[in-house]
Image (cartoon, rainbow, N blue to C red):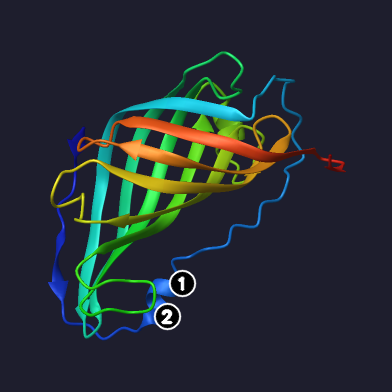
Amino acid sequence: MERSHKLTGSQNVPWTQRTWISLGLLLVVFFWGITAPEKAWSSNMVWEIGDATLLSEGNATEGSQGLLLLGAEIKATATARSANVPIQEGLLTLNFGLFQPSEDMPGQKAGRWYLVGTWRLENATAPEAVRSVRHNPETLTGQLLADLDVNPLVEPSSFVALLRTSAYEAAKAAIGTGALILNEKFSGQMELNVKQGYEKGGVQ
């Protein structure tokens, strides 16, 4: 695991909870008019995550309600554990922020770290022209959430983040949940459990 940027020092800049709430992005996924090759897919998918690089530890802002860190980014490789997963060799990107409240808030405890962000898994073998399109048939996207004891960007530690995907574009589509289980080097595994599958014509 490589680290290419260091955490920027905290700044005394005013901010409100709206800044944090804005991190809870709702992804609206549209199907792009590209026909993907037919691929078999299963409801339970697992990838091994490795070769992680911490591209950015983000920028920290300290306010009256706590410490807010925005702009963290991690990239890694993803290798499918079984042959019935459409994305066999993937490129995983995590973009997220972290919030540590200075006092208890509804659903949040003082001193803990709350991670909110998005993830993107691209088929590494797909043509660049396809992968460069925002909504394409070779990409999985979704949100990630975690409630942590420490900030893993500053204090290396293993952690688990909950995943949600609002569309599965790499062979038909789906709605599902899962988990991202990473060690202190941001390697580990990604699990996704598809709850609903549908073709472009509608929900099955």
Residue at 29% of width from left, 31% of height from top? Answer: 187
- Quarter of the image for residue 138 reads top right
Q: Nearer the viewer, residue 141 or 130?
A: 141
Q: Is residue 148 above or below residue 94?
A: below
Q: Name the image quarter holding the C terminus.
A: top right
Which amino acid, by three-letter code, is at mark 2? Arg
- Marks 2 and 1 sit apart, C-alpha to C-alpha, by 6 Å
Disc 2, SS? helix
- Between residue 122 and residue 183, name the one nearer to us: 183
> For the residue carrying disc 1, how many other residues have a C-alpha within 10 Å: few (<14), some (14-19), or many (20+)?
few
Residue that badge 1 annotates: 22
Q: Quadrant of the N terminus?
A: top left
**Mark 1 and mark 2 in contact (Cβ < 8 Å)?**
yes
Circle 2 residue = 18
Say left or right for 106 vs 120.
left
x%, y% of residue 48? 39, 24
Q: Nearer the viewer, residue 60 or 133?
A: 60
Q: What's the residue type where badge 1 is placed?
A: Ser
Q: Position of residue 157 (x, y in %)?
A: 18, 43
